[in-house]
Amino acid sequence: MAKGRVKMRDHGAESSLYWRRAVIAFMGIVLLMGVLLANLYHLQINEHQSYQTRSNDNRIKIVPIAPTRGLIYDRNGVLLAENRPIYSLEITPEQSPDLDATVDELTDLLGLDPEVKKRFLAEVRRQRRFNPVVLVNRLSEEQVALFSINQHKYPGATIEAYLKRFYPYRDTFTHVIGYVARINDKDVTRLREDNKLANYAATRDIGKLGVERYYEDLLHGQAGYQEVEVNNRGRVIRTLTYQPPTPGSDIYLNVDVALQVKAQKLMADRRGAAVIMTPKDGKILALISSPSYDPNLFVHGISSPEYRELLNNPDRPLINRATQGIYAPASTVKPMLAVMGLNEGAITPSTRYFGGPYFQIPNTKRKFRDWRRWGHGWMDVYRAIEISADTFFYDLAYRVGIDNLHDYMTRFGFGQYSGIDLHEETSGTMPSRDWKQARHKQPWYQGDTISVGIGQGYWTATPLQLARAIAIMVDHGETVHPRLLHGIKGPEGMISMPVSKSEPIQLKQDSFWDVGLAGMYRVINGREGTARRAFADTPYKAGGKSGTAQVFSLAENQQYDHASTREHLRDNALFVALAPFEKPEVVVSVVLENAGGGSSHAAPVARALLDLYMIPEPLQNTEGEEQHNE
């Protein structure tokens, strides 16, 4: 067998291969180093600001601080809405050696509901252990004192104070001031749409109704903040900067506590509303809706049983009857209708009309009866207002027509929003041909006009609209808008609100206003005036007009009997008034639901309110006086 050759190694080829590999490896290393350096340059130079910001976001937190809510006062500086401290017991879990035992002992010490522990432990599981967790809110002063003397036994447990809204007059001003309550999803959506959500980052409550809601932006203020440094677990290490919040503005209302309290007492145990207003500038001195409710129930979160009780109450205390209650205005609008008739030439101050027991549209059989069965005989416009003769105004409405009637009464504010600084308002209904067609899909009939001619039928109005209409009468057509806000307390003093007006009502003769007002004077001071007994012996002169509004329609020959009619079907009592007559300073409207005659029931309430305004001495007692029913 032949012996094989031994192959010699090619050292040159190996050396060449080595160097080629070394160069390729070196170039790879250089390339990778270049990529690394380029990435480092990108991170450290190009993206420096971005990553520094993200680093600071992890290290520095912005903690919002809620502003103190502004206070609300009446026209004389009486506090109506304040901020009171409430005390809560909080425990920091990591500082408590035995959390279960601590909670059990505090529950026994303070007499807490056993369910408190279950809710507390559930909340602890959702929080970081270095964050304090509320064990119980709204501690009483006795509980605060009891804990304070035993605090050394419970490490990690502390008392914290927070400001919460409180309404000292409780249900007296509910429908004026409203209330604040916890912010809900609906509020968040609205705040986000208005680009205001950031200002509420630390705020728990927001205005829900009344002035609290309407002037929320003024009362809330501007949130502050503090920058704090935290570690990787979120614990605050130190405070870097502090920007204090701007407290909300204090506001002053036009309402008068004395008038409001008196009005509420007069309306006690009744359903209805009362409005007291100055005609020259539209200031609301009192606005009562009865029954009412305590707004403090909503501040801390009303319970389901309590809310259901309010919601299901047949007297509907949640409704602001002064601005949302709609009633047939009845005879209270006859002075305005008389002014309309004079301006349209349908009547003159000396027109004579014979008022029988009823009015009939020519060539028809239906009879529109007067409130007095045997009629009133011969009368002029002054006496027609004084005795509230229905037949006179039936005839006037028939001759003027619904188109003119709608046009004039709309200018008096009926069927329109009044412009008051409350969101809770209803416009009522000032009917017209188009309105009936749109609402009932029916044409307008002449009989509809006759009912509207005495403030009945489809016509509905709020007590506030009645007060405003009388103010327009007093001011000879000047149309002021009612106002609750008197002024805002700023750093330089009180900033008063300007008077808000619309286009005035222009008449052919200014003396037509005096005719309507003279009729109102005779209602109270005339020999046959429907309210002469309610206003007997007043040391001032006033004008007024009563109204009795049917709640349901009677058959043609059916007579209304108050005693035998079910309570919720009885007539509503209304009265509007002004005083002093020579130069009126104030107007009043009163509506009492299902009370009966306006001159018998509503007029004494109006008299008592005017007495309080006009007479500095204690109110005269008018109870027990014989009253005249319209």
Image (tube, rainbow, N blue to C red):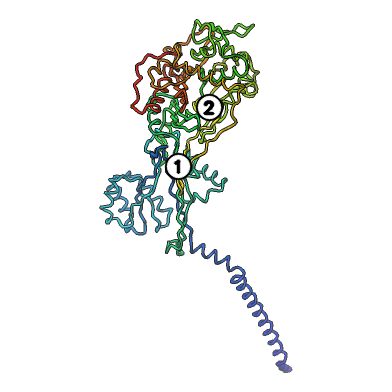
Mark 2 or mark 1: whose residue is earlier in sequence:
1
Q: Is mark 1 on a helix, strand or loop?
A: strand
Residue 251 is tagged as 1
Is 502 drawn above or below residue 3 in the view shown? above
Q: Which residue lies furthest to the left in this view?
A: 149
Neighbours of disc 1 within 10 Å: few (<14), some (14-19), many (20+): many
Is 22 drawn above or below residue 515 in the view shown? below
Indicate the position of residue 379 as horizontal and vertical percent values: 53, 9
**380 vs 329, nearest the viewer:** 380
Q: What element carries label 2?
A: loop
The answer to whether residue 115 shows anywhere in this view is yes
**108 vs 508, nearest the viewer:** 508
Name the side, left or right, on which 257 lies relative to 58. left
Q: Distance between the residues labelled 2 and 1?
A: 28 Å
Residue type at the position of mark 1: Ile
Name the side, left or right, on which 114 lies relative to 6. left
Q: In which quarter of the image is residue 287?
A: top left
Indicate the position of residue 487 as horizontal and vertical percent values: 47, 41
Residue 475 is tagged as 2
Q: For the N terminus, which image quadrant? A: bottom right
Residue type at the position of mark 2: Asp
